[in-house]
Image (cartoon, rainbow, N blue to C red):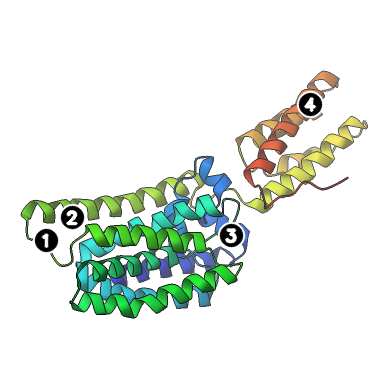
Amino acid sequence: MVFFLILLNLVFFLTTLLSGGFSINILLRLGAKYGPLIVSGEWQRLLLCMFLHGSIWHLFFNMYALYNLGRLAEGVYGAKKFFIIYIITGMGGSLLSLVMNYANVSVGASGAIFGLAGALFASGLKYRNTSLNRMAINLLPFILINLLFGFVTPVVDNGAHIGGLISGMLLGYLVSPGESWSSWKRKAEEILQWVMMIFIAVSVVTFFIPNGFRGRTSLDSVIVFHNQMQGYIESAQNGSLPPMNRLESLKAPDREAQSIKNKFLEYTSSRVKNDAYLQEIVNDFMEWRKNILKKYEGLIYEKDS
């Protein structure tokens, strides 16, 4: 199961490379954690961000930690429990990151990795005078050093680390090591593992399929549409209309923008220019603009005049 998770991270990494690199815009399109987009309905980001990374070194260090901690955790809990702990604690990290760093873009597997460390540490505290207890003592420097590094390094999302650690410790205390003896527990673990697998598949499908596997709206396309449409509207207010071919080729990033574009095309092609209709287009554009500034809070700033 460790190698399956590493492979999944590598698939997302290659997708990032093929999509154009590690810019914030690309990471947002592929599912990075970003509070305003999550609360607007893109819940899949809480899961997808766990498999995205911001650079090859980010991926390397997280996969190195996953390989080492993952093998320990899988050996202690078994493949099913290990996988369940990894996904739940990763999302626990995403949720606390959402609270602590709402307007920050965040990616990486470190929340889930801290979750594994937390689960092993809690098991070691629970089962004293065992090898698990010695393992917990050995893990303590790793946990403390990485938490301290997160507090002194602004680019590190310590909210994800702390969220993963807390949820991992909770699961480590509740979940018994080794394979379950009861047949109903083994069946429940198998069902929960498949639920997690299906949840990952559903998250990927519902996030990418509606957009033809292109990911979410490009931040660049939002900015381009805004700037060009704003210029066209200002020209129309001054009595000068843009060429139809330029207006028709302007790509609308969402349904509201497409509606504004269609209305402006209708206004431009009309022989009689209706000032009230132009004002309606202006009002729609300003409402769309306000919503975009709110949606991409912290990424798009309104220019001072």
Q: Which residue is mark 4?
A: 267
Q: Name the residue located 81 percent from the left edge and 25 percent from the top edge.
A: 278
Q: Quadrant of residue 25?
A: bottom right
Q: Position of residue 178 (x, y in %)?
A: 15, 67
Q: Are marks 3 and 4 in contact (CB under 8 Å)?
A: no
Secondary structure found at label 1: loop
Q: Position of residue 132 (x, y in %)?
A: 22, 75
Q: Label 1, on which residue?
A: 180
Amino acid at pointer 2: Glu
Q: Position of residue 207 (x, y in %)?
A: 46, 48
Amino acid under label 3? Ile
Pointer 4: residues within 10 angstroms few (<14), some, or many (20+)? some
Q: Is 249 on the left-hand or right-hand side of 190?
A: right
Q: Nearer the viewer, mark 4 or mark 1?
A: 1
Q: Report the mark closest to the observer, 3 or 4.
A: 3
Q: Is residue 137 above or below residue 88?
A: below
Residue assigned mark 3: 26
Q: Residue at x 71, y 37 (%)?
A: 290
Q: CA distance from mark 4 to mark 1?
A: 69 Å
- First along the sequence among labels 2 and 1: 1
| CB contact under 8 Å: marks 2 and 1 | yes
State which quarter of the image contains the N terminus: bottom left
